[in-house]
Image: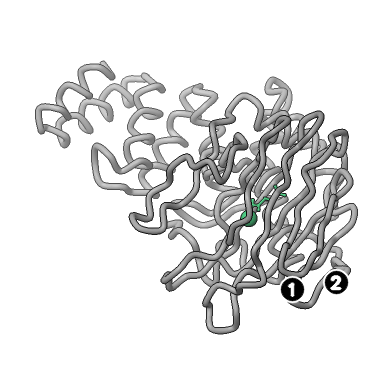
Amino acid sequence: MIDEAYALAERGSADEAVRLLERSGQDGEAAAWLELGAWFLSGQIIRRDLSRARECFRLAGDGGDAQGATLYRNFLGIGVGGDRDWPGAVALLRRAAGTDRDAAAQLALLEAMALDPEGDPSTTFAPRELSAAPHVASFEGFLTAAECDYLVNLALPIMQPSVVVDPRSGAMRPDPVRTSHAAMLAWADENPLVHALNRRIAAASGTAVTAGEPLQLLRYTPGQEYRPHFDALPNVTNQRVLTMLVYLNEDYEGGATSFPKSGLSYRGKTGDALLFRNALGDGRPDPASLHAGAPVTRGTKYLASRWIHQREFMPMR
Ligand SMILES: O=C(O)CCC(=O)C(=O)O
Ligand SMILES: [Fe+2]
């Protein structure tokens, strides 16, 4: 039936393909709702419609599809395709935790956090200033060791060679400047635990959580590095003004984050975070923000990286 829907869409009958998936969904085929939700989310076969995607994932989950249930819960926790309902997302997580090990792991970590009813940290963060130009600050013990382990285990099965933004075309492509592997936690992978960590990053950096690009989890094995580069992009109107890095482990050698213009070099312990400013007041890249991840010489370095823009990065409706 899903093959049939694809065949219809390829022949130009996308509306008919949608109706076919809807009919199978109504007949109890939960996988049809999941498929249709994916179509509405990607926008490749039919026009992107995030609220319809969210509704399809809800129907898939209600029909017993575990992936649909996960996607609906993630969208509810973030606020994609409709109102954000944090208590609702946590309640769904609690209901799933009996049979779903990942849901149980998320719930245990969330319950150990001091969060307000919206999922924002109820504590404040004290940065330690490391350098004024470029502006760099650290937050020691920003994530717990258990939170770091959770992120590493989440990333391992979905790691891909890292990409960079091509400054001419704007497209993402692999480049020898960045030889690590990375997992990008887009909305579908931004589960309530990841979302709570993104809100912690937003609170500590004094930014809106919607201004962040998807959290990236990076893995560097010996010889891999991120050569000197700027996170800020030339000629954009919604600049990547800040970067937050969180060091997820410490049992490796080499791999320090360094700022060649100021001579600052930082190697966080497990759970430490580094926040730096990439742009000048007017949004132009700050030349002093040049930085690098030095080659790892032994062991494996795991890092979480979040690029933060001036305004909302991607509309959620
Ligand atoms: O690996 C590092 O220490 C630097 C990572 C980095 O520069 C980035 O993710 O933008
Ligand atoms: Fe960077």
Query: x, y (%) of residue 314?
Result: 45, 58
- Residue 49 horizontal side relative to residue 139, left or right: left
Return the residue nearer the eye: 134 or 177: 177
Mark 1 touches mark 2? (CB < 8 Å) = yes
Q: Which residue is mark 1?
A: 135
Disc 1 crowd, CA 10 A, few/some/many (<14, 14-19, 20+)? some
Q: How many marks?
A: 2
Q: Amino acid at mark 2?
A: Glu
Viewer can see residue 8? yes
Q: Earlier in the sequence, mark 1 or mark 2?
A: 2
For the N terminus, give its image quadrant. Answer: top left
**Relative height, residue 233 to residue 162 (above, below):** below
Query: x, y (%) of residue 313?
Result: 49, 61
**Relative height, residue 80 to residue 3 (above, below):** below
**Relative height, residue 264 to residue 86 (above, below):** below
Query: x, y (%) of residue 173?
Result: 43, 42
For the C terminus, give its image quadrant. Answer: bottom left
Q: Which picture quadrant has residue 119?
A: bottom right
Return the residue nearer the eye: 149 or 18: 149
Residue at horizontal 39 percent and vertical 21 percent from the top = 31
Viewer can see residue 147? no
Residue at horizontal 62 percent and vertical 48 percent from the top = 215
Residue at horizontal 79 percent and vertical 60 percent from the top = 121
Label 1 secondary element? loop
| Mark linked to residue 95 | none
Q: Which residue is mark 2?
A: 129
Label 2 secondary element? strand
- Residue 159 horizontal side relative to residue 263, left or right: left
Q: Label 1, label 2: how many angstroms apart (C-alpha)?
A: 8 Å
